[in-house]
Image (tube, rainbow, N blue to C red):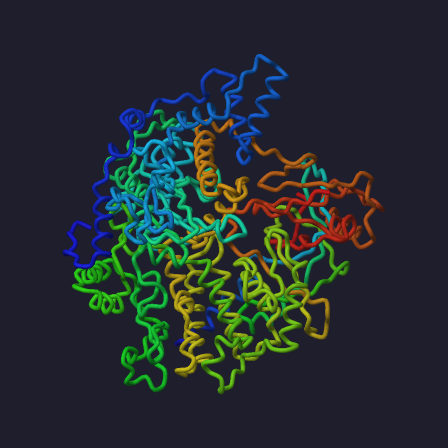
Amino acid sequence: MDENYPPAAIERIRVAIEFIELVKTATLASQFDTEELADFLNPLEHDSTPDNDPDLMLSLQAFIGLLGCSQGEYERMRQYTHQRDPDIEMLSYYQVERRARILSGISTWEDHMCINSCVGFTGPFKDLDHCPDCGQPRYTTQEEFDEPSRKIPRKVFTTFSVGPQLQSRWKHPQTAKDMFYRWEKTQDLRQECEDPPAAPEIYDDILCGQAYLDASKEAPINEYDTVLMLSIDGAQLHRNKKSDCWIYIWIIVDLGPDKRYKIRNILPGGIIPGPERPKNLDSFLFPGLAHVSALQHEGLPIWDAYHRRRAICFLFLILILADAVAMAELSGSIGHHGRKGCRLLCGLAGRNKNHGSHYYPALLRPYGFEHHRTSSHPDIDINELPNPSPTQYRRDLFHIISSRHETELGRRRLNTGIGKPSIFDGLPRTLDLPTCFGGDLMHQPLINIAALLLDLWSARPSARDYDRNSDWPWAVLTGDTWNTHGKAVAQAARYLPTSFGRVPRNPQEKASSGYKAREFLYYIYGQGPGLFFGVLPEPYYSHFCKLVRAIRLIYQRVISRQQVIDAHMLLLQWCSEFKLIYCQRNPDRLHFVRQCVHSLTHLAKETHRLGPLSLSSQWTMERVIGYLGSLLRQPSNMFRHLAAQSRRLAYVNALVSMWPAFQVEEKDPRGSNDIGDGYLLLGPKDTDLYHPSDAEQTALNNFLSGDPDYEEIEQQSLYRWARLKLPTEQTARSRYKEVDRCPDMARTDRNVKVCRLNASPH
Amino acid sequence: MHHLIEFDLHLRNLIQILHEGYIHFAEVRFYFTKTLGDMSRAFALVSIYSPPDEYLLRHSNTALVVCRYRGEEILAVIDVKSILSVVAMVPFPFIVGGRGDQHFVIEKIGLDVLEADDSEDDE
């Protein structure tokens, strides 16, 4: 970080370095106007109620409550209210949004961009009039406007300032208290893990990961500091391709995991309109990252309403999350086809087929590769795989930067896995590069491994064609077997509880396109062991079960240290056996060893480093995108509308954190019975006394005979309840509900896991 | 050495499922409240599935948990607070130990940090 980069000869790399330097030297003064800056630097002591103005209160409440409705709907509501009582003067939509902006202090920055989404006109491109990539003009042609001096940008992208959004998190005693979760958990963990040094017994948060624990001491990350994750993803807002865009958000790690991922606690970061892919992502992230860099250097002043004192907080960016394609762009790696294609940049060298440019991370050297030009290296022991190393990364990066020409760069890219420096190198407080780039728990183990196994088991031509003539004992999903199996998967859907979400459709018909991650999850890792039993021959079935077991462990919300170790051993076994029983050192089968196979070897180590990986997966981002998509109602001007709705979301989230009373608390459903510890009985309930069957009668008597006040009664009668809400947020139903009352329920929610059977009446 | 570790791992998984914490699977027939002493408590009347088939458990590295549905043969009253989670019991199309009515268990797989409860199904 302190060392200066060597001089760069290649233009692309020079531009990347310029962005990094500009991020490094960014100041808050250049990001706000004078008045804004003064307010921002002096957060006021804050009262827990807004102005004593009932009309303003009502307007803000309607603004928050009608998020997702159009401005017209707000205006109608205002009109009705006024008609009912002419004394009530709600603010107009324009006024209320203005008040929301002032109260929250959130600035929205609009920067110009290329009409084809190549670059944003920021950083080194700030003063250009044409796109440096495609040459399209930045401004609308003059003759369309009367005043020739006015320059109208053809397209803009939006960034929301994260500093004010974070300040609002401290302005109410209750919300401010929630921000201390991280610090309290840190104290507990230090006590557990420092003397003697050990990994935590239980991993239940990112904070349990070694990466955070080390950084919290080395950086250091203090009581008032804020730890953030950045998550970026492409989104298709509508069915049509024209609606592609890129969204990024900030996630506050200081909040407990139960609150952290809720929509109300997500901070919108920016919106990059498509539909073309942004070519230079750095230029679009620049305004947001320059702001974070300035906050990291200068500190974010806050008013802590819980302790009623001022403090300065220094942001720490712990992880950057993205899907595989965007991640290569952000980390500056060369992507998964490269020779060193692991997205974590662990440096494992892959092997390619003769003259192929696509490399596969095969540990075992295929037969006949002894003198291969690029892939002759001997077998690699799976227990001695390399780990991502910041020192090595820096050495490789400097090597890349100092390339004298494209050919040399090409050669060095091949040998290092790095293509260019990353803009995140400009931030002073992150995990060391490349360890700040998160893995991808969703696509690689889920979709890609599932797709690989199905390709092999159903002998899809894409996998089979290279290896036409050999025997494939595992290729059993053909003809009638595949038909029957596919139907069985779809039929099993009705036995899956509602809380499992979307159920797998028939994979024979759907798995090759548009099958959702969640469908793969419950098809392969849920139903798999049951439905492939007797279908997949040995040793393939037992081998598959090891993967299932390991993935189920890794995907848990809470994982014990022992389970992480177990999962690691199962995954390593699965990977080495995969090469023995499927690939068999056959050079024609090199393409079986996709990057996703290698990614499994990282899962347990990543869990140790970052805590349960579901807490740093892209699922949050996916849900935010779904939520923003649901707020859209004007497909005609989609990107502007999306930016406006995201801004509204940022305001609403800030207002609700400043005045939690604005959020209408969700009440328990009518007629429910709260029995404590997170359990809630839910209706429907019998209206007439129920007379149990003989067998039920016996069970009731057996149970009640333990009660000292129990009197033997011939016939127990009672009122039945149909449903029970569990602390897991799942709702368990019952036979009474699903068989007696609604025999046509689409799903089965009455089977439960129970920890002890003997209920004592005492 | 390698085999020894593998065996140990396997055994630990087995023990976890079979015995540790006395995990069982059950079908809820209905819930009810009962005042015992001066406390109102909630119970569930359940039908308990058989313990998992040990051969299949071993064979699948504990990924395949197959239990038999026993209907009214074995009913019991449990405290609702001993219910840990909702699971799927999917019919297993093979005869095990000479008997039908077999189901295999699927538990909810992680990733639930941010899901709203989508199980609303009020009548």
In the picture shown, does residue A99 fall above or below A260?
above
- Residue sitting farthest toward the top: A87
Q: Quadrant of the C terminus of chain B?
A: top right
Q: Does residue A219 appear in the picture of this structure?
A: no
Front in this rendered view, residue A747 or A224 = A747
- Residue sitting farthest toward the right: A714
Give x and y (percent) for residue A479: 63, 78
In the picture shown, does residue A422 fall above or below A720?
below
Give x and y (percent) for residue A637: 48, 41
Q: Quadrant of the N terminus of chain B?
A: bottom left
In the picture shown, does residue A126 fall above or below A301?
below
Give x and y (percent) for residue A392: 22, 62
Q: Residue at 22%, 51% (x, y): give it.
A: A17
Give x and y (percent) for residue A604: 40, 61
Question: Is residue A215 left or right of B91 when viewed as pictured?
Answer: left
In the picture shown, does residue A12 fall above or below A310?
below
Question: Is residue A127 left or right of A352 when viewed as pictured?
Answer: left
Q: How many marks?
A: 0
Q: Does residue A65 appear in the picture of this structure?
A: yes
Front in this rendered view, residue A741 or A673 = A741
Q: Quadrant of residue A534?
A: bottom right
Front in this rendered view, residue A426 or A33 = A33
Front in this rendered view, residue A202 or A407 = A407
